[in-house]
Amino acid sequence: MTILRRLYDWSMRSAAHRHALPALFLIAFVEASFFPIPPDVLIIPMILAAREKAWLIALVATIGSVVGGFLGYGIGWGLFEVIGRPLLDFYGYSGQFEEFAAMYNEWGGWIVAAGGFTPFPYKVITIASGTTGLDPLTFGLASLVSRAGRFFLVAALLYWFGPAIRNFIEAWLPQLAALFFALLFGGFLALRYVF
């Protein structure tokens, strides 16, 4: 049995563990402010392991992400020079951050809504929102709509097509893992040159 297969089997067993929901909340919380791995890596095995909890899993991820988004907002608002700028430097996003932040004056709510739904690193959105002083109510509502939309869409697809998707994942696990990491690395690399 390969290491990847053991890791997959462990994640499927862990997804049904009684501490899986608090762990998901924590991952969604920290991903919204500074952690690089999206909560989808927990959402997917959790729903595949317990389809009847799909909506609860999506709700926990949404709440964790929105609450964590306010931590990212706080980093941008009050701690940008101390924490925010070094985080952006670490992830390679600071090069053109000023141009990106300037767009918030006109398009803030729409940027948060789009960024929260896409694979774009949400922490960049949350920190930029705080840095530019985007209205917290606009930020919170846009975050709630976009994050709920994303996580509930994933939950719905896995709920309705779960057994087929699980069979597909298990049959193509090495190739899918390689593709996931290539896309994740490629996304960070692309963002380094775009923003």
Image (spheres, rainbow, N blue to C red):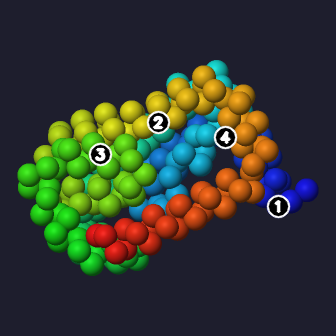
Q: What residue lies at 60% left-to-right and 30% top-to-bottom?
A: 158
**What is the secondary structure assignment of the residue under circle 3?**
helix
Q: Which residue is mark 2?
A: 151
Question: Looking at the image, do the residues carrying marks 2 and 1 touch, with CB atoms under 8 Å apart?
Answer: no
- Gap in angstroms between the C-alphas marked 2 and 3: 14 Å
The label number, if any, that marks residue 114 in the structure image: 3
Question: Looking at the image, do the residues carrying marks 2 and 3 touch, with CB atoms under 8 Å apart?
Answer: no
Q: Which residue is mark 1?
A: 3
Q: Which residue is mark 4?
A: 45
Tally the marks.
Answer: 4
Sequence-first tag of 2 and 1? 1
State the image coordinates of residue 118 (x, y, percent, origin top left): 39, 47
- Look at label 2 and name its amino acid: Phe
State the image coordinates of residue 28 (x, y, percent, origin top left): 48, 47
Q: Quadrant of residue 72?
A: bottom left
- Look at label 4 and name its amino acid: Pro
Question: Looking at the image, do the residues carrying marks 1 and 3 touch, with CB atoms under 8 Å apart?
Answer: no
* Classed neighbour count for the residue bearing mark 2: other residues with Cα under 10 Å, few (<14), some (14–19), many (≥20): many
Observer-side mark, 2 or 3, equals 3
